[in-house]
Amino acid sequence: MKSKHWVVGNWKMNGSRQFVQQWLTEWQLGCDKLTASASQLEILVCPPAIYLPLFAEKIAAEQIAEANITQLRLAGQNVSAYAQGAYTGELSAAMLQDYQCSHVLIGHSERRQLFAETDEVVAQKVATAQTQGLRPILCVGETQAQREQQATESVVAAQLDAVLEKIGAEKLAQVIIAYEPIWAIGTGLSATPEQAQAVHASIRTWLRSEQITCTPLLYGGSVSPDNAAALFSQPDIDGVLVGGASLSAHSFLQICQTAV
């Protein structure tokens, strides 16, 4: 039996000050309905960096009041490969931690495809994040063409190999891995639970070959309240990385409730 489920919401470049405030209000009203077993959940939200202070302030206030919103934790959508310095426009791990981020997404397919982040750059970001005290959520996945060429496992393995070479197996064991087929990101398409499970099983086999046995594996790719239960039921899927559905506090709560 899985000891813990993960639900991670990635807002991408969406939102506004008003939107964040409304979302937090709806979340606070709805999270009271989560069952007591929600303590088995790890719930994270990755808002645009500019809105992290709004989340951090609200979470800090609720912690003082001992309200249920404290179940919500923060993660950055990206992080610099450098700890500090003359890197205009970048955000360091320490800056993210200033606003209560405990985790950070690294290697999301949009970063790899649209911003030309290579496996080597992704590996360096993982190393820097860990050194600076953030837990990376490493995204891996294949394109539609690679899937059609039956190269899914080799593509994912190569992405993992680059990080393994940089940080070693002991530190890789502390990384959360999110499999997100690129062809299912924001398309409305989703890998079937069986397709997702097959890739997760291959990742689990790869990890075991490196003597890594406890790394959480998440699935990302058009996750919704409608398919969450089937995904959580798969033996090697420990959680989900939610895109568009996380922009609705109600839908995100539904997915969290499904997880418990």
Image: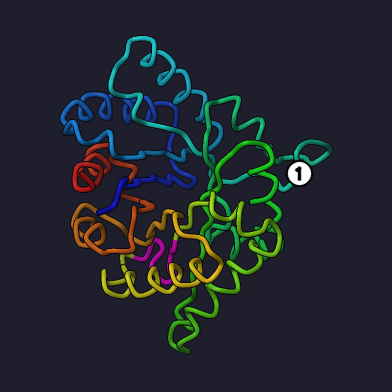
As helix, strand or loop, the secondary structure at mark 1 comes to: loop
- State the residue lying farthest toward the front: 211
Q: Is residue 108 left or right of residue 25?
A: right
Vertical position of residue 41 compared to residue 117: above or below: above
| Residue wearing tag 1 | 82
Please tell me which residue is depicted at 25% across the width and 42% down the height of the picture.
256
Rendering colour mode: rainbow
Position above or below: 210 against 33: below
Please state the extent of the stretch shown in magenta in the rendering: 179-187
Q: Position of residue 163 (x, y in %)?
A: 64, 61
Q: Quadrant of the N terminus?
A: bottom left
| 13 part of magenta stretch | no
Residue 187 lies, with reference to residue 216, above or below; the image says below
Residue found at x 59% / y 39%: 134
Q: Is residue 186 magenta?
A: yes
Q: Residue at x 60, y 74 (%)?
A: 158
Residue 64 rendering spot, x and y as whole percentages: 39, 10
